[in-house]
Image: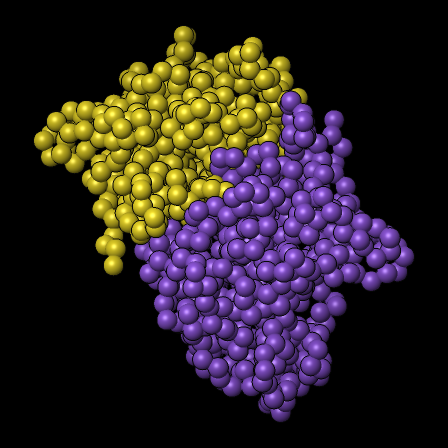
Chain colours: A yellow, B purple
Amino acid sequence: MTIPLNETHDPSLRSWVASANTGSTDFPIQNLPYGVFRRAGTAEAFRVGVAIGDAILDMTAAVASGAFNQASEGAHTAAQACRAPVLNDLMDLGPTAWSALRLALSRMLREGASEQAALQTCLIPQAAVEYGVPARIGDYTDFYTSIHHATNIGKLLRPDNPLLPNYQWVPIGYHGRCSSIGVSGQAVRRPVSQVMRPGASAPVLAPSARLDYELEVGIFVGGSNALGEPIALDAAEQHVFGLCLFNDWSARDVQGWEYQPLGPFLSKNFASTVSPWVVTLEALAPYREAFNRPADHPQPLPYLDSPTLRASGAVAIELEVFLHTAAQQHKGLSEQRLSHSNFRDAYWTVSQMVAHHTVGGCNLHSGDLLGSGTQSGPAPEEAGSLMELSRGGKEPIAIAGGETRTFLEDGDTVIFRAHCQAAGTARIGFGEVRGTILPARTVA
Amino acid sequence: MTIPLNETHDPSLRSWVASANTGSTDFPIQNLPYGVFRRAGTAEAFRVGVAIGDAILDMTAAVASGAFNQASEGAHTAAQACRAPVLNDLMDLGPTAWSALRLALSRMLREGASEQAALQTCLIPQAAVEYGVPARIGDYTDFYTSIHHATNIGKLLRPDNPLLPNYQWVPIGYHGRCSSIGVSGQAVRRPVSQVMRPGASAPVLAPSARLDYELEVGIFVGGSNALGEPIALDAAEQHVFGLCLFNDWSARDVQGWEYQPLGPFLSKNFASTVSPWVVTLEALAPYREAFNRPADHPQPLPYLDSPTLRASGAVAIELEVFLHTAAQQHKGLSEQRLSHSNFRDAYWTVSQMVAHHTVGGCNLHSGDLLGSGTQSGPAPEEAGSLMELSRGGKEPIAIAGGETRTFLEDGDTVIFRAHCQAAGTARIGFGEVRGTILPARTVA
């Protein structure tokens, strides 16, 4: 499936929400991402909103305003599904309903729309809210789709044999922990766990000394497949609601000791952080690119290959990592960009992840989250983790203000941002996901 | 924590439900396990029940009958929490409430109880119902607690180095898939996935040819810990509602190709099956045994060790695997016992699993499911999987009726049963978990 461009993608569209028309906002009228929010500092129930400029359209209020009374049946139904504390009901409805709601929102938020008066009262400044995790996540799966990341990490562990034989055939993935997934702003306590120190004969219980971020794209599933019924590659994107930013925090020393033979466990399950805004696949349609495997690489097996995949399987999303240390904050220094990469460089696409995940019959549900795995690009400065940037902790990175880093220190704030831009299109952004490292608890 | 024996454990207790007094039933009045059920073939909502003999006490009906009106406040509250389609609300209440409800149920179901007339109308024959998954499972974690299984499997993969260096230090675990967990009676479609055949230069998409069961104990969490706040070893069992039987179906050929470096994925996520009845930790109190590490093994780190653990950390549960092939069923032959083992032989206990899972701050919630990992005992005939019994498929097992097996074939039904018995106690059982293999879907 390729989503065709339509009037909602027109780069000349302007909104009656003036802050949406600046050219630099992440949330112009061509974007319209979904999230859940409440007024900051209250105990209100979370509710669904749509980001527009520096504001949020409160969907519960918008429905109550009557703005959707004259909308298409699909848009009306989808808007009703937004009267909920999470996006799962909307995600359940599928791409026709998602598209109908997007068209209705685009028309209502345009300059000159008759709904302006009614909807103006349904806007809340983004600065006045706090966010929730956008969906009730039933299962979370983390993939490993960057061959550059897999090779970089492999070189540190196995210099002679960095890339395992299955990598170019299998979209490698593993199941992760749902309960510890939080939303941007999460305070992440440095985990305490078993580590085996170099040269030691026995492990110790200690705070992780190699705490890291992982720059990932999060993929929210929409709709379900029955247990035992795979989703074919070309139908896969009909089961994807949208994309977000995702930080899959990792304790490298814990992982190194625990991960054989069954994979990461405590090294990952202490926290993961999603961005508040989910950018729909339809909003990303203008930034789709060809997906090509280098000719000297194994080509995907038939269940992971199609002409549509080759024509438009990739999504060009420019990803950036920023660090803001406690010392920098204290000195009034700005955050510092550590690296950047692009999701177009992923070795496996969103549709390949979905098709592979389900080929054996595994059932996906609305709200399930897939992580793309760390997105590192081909160049060294495009590495999506400190493990890679510091060459396994051997080469400290210089930080503005006179500090260095190999891994994260207490008080560090990590921020990911992302945006898409292409010739003849609007620039749309993902907002950000940020998290701050708290000191470990005291080990008795 | 050790749960003290009390009047509910008295082996001389008899119930006014006559089938509970046979001595051979899994469900005497000393057991009182919880599950969810509805009348077979209906679309009724599932509801909570308690197994007693060959019947089920419908808890919604029992509450409505007024039987709990004179019960203790704790029992009354816990009984109200049973008016739900899953056990999560009851699991949330914690051990004091669980114990109060058990005492009330034990007294009401005893011979001579004044509630007999009211409750008699709340009984439904087990033969007339179908079961649901007992809890809404937020996260599922599979452990690997049998050193015999780890060694047996390790010998097949790494003859010179069967047990990895971390095994005796770390309760190895990994996150699994919740969506594909079903209840006893599940029909399991043979998964299709990528496999790399011996000597091949490229993988193929094919039905698994090495489909296996894994004999596991399931552990249902009750209560929650906050993210970042570990559960100490001696408090761990306060966060355990009860135990069940669990079949963690595995596709060995798929696993062998996909599992490095991040662990099992499609080889496990096509299906897992729980038994309908959850036996509470309090019911298991008479079958607790000392937990001792051999003196020449590394002793557990302090966060995984305590005098209470040493005194009573193990639970003696006799586990059995039965196979009933389609040909046996056709010929009228009975199912055949393939192996048996005992949960007392686990290298890591229930409390160690909980303490390790949370030591880095991971938060558990009511309804979370922990799998014990395949329970194999020290003797070859105590292996908990076909992979072990057939020595990696090299030594076919003879099956009554003239068949042999290395791995599971289409139409095979696998049944696990379990019971506990000790001197001076009643015999209690877990019922069974069964599942049948369906042919793979056609691969295009």
Count of marks placed on residues: 0
Which residue is situated farthest in the right direction here?
B331
Asked where in the image residue A228 lies, by quadrant, the reply is top right
Q: Is residue A163 left or right of residue A393?
A: right
Which residue is situated farthest in the bottom direction here?
B112
Say which quadrant the N terminus of chain B sits in: bottom left
Toward the viewer: A343 or B80? A343
Residue A166 appears at what percent x and percent y?
Answer: 56, 28
Toward the viewer: B229 or A1? B229
Asked where in the image residue A237 lies, by quadrant, the reply is top right
Residue B335 appears at what percent x and percent y?
Answer: 79, 61
Q: Is residue A389 left or right of residue A278?
A: left
Residue found 46% across the figure and 63% down from its top: B294
Residue found 64% across the figure and 56% down from its top: B384
Q: Is residue A12 visible?
A: yes
Say which quadrant the C terminus of chain B sits in: top right
Above or below A433: residue B243: below
Toward the viewer: A177 or A424? A177
Q: Is residue A98 visible?
A: no
Which residue is situated farthest in the top direction here?
A423
Asked where in the image residue A361 lies, by quadrant, the reply is top right
Above or below A101: residue B93: below
Above or below A51: residue A411: below
Residue A34 appears at what percent x and percent y?
Answer: 42, 33
Residue B171 appears at what percent x and percent y?
Answer: 45, 53
Which residue is situated farthest in the left direction here?
A331
Residue found 55% across the figure and 80% down from its top: B105
Residue found 49% across the figure and 59% down from its top: B347
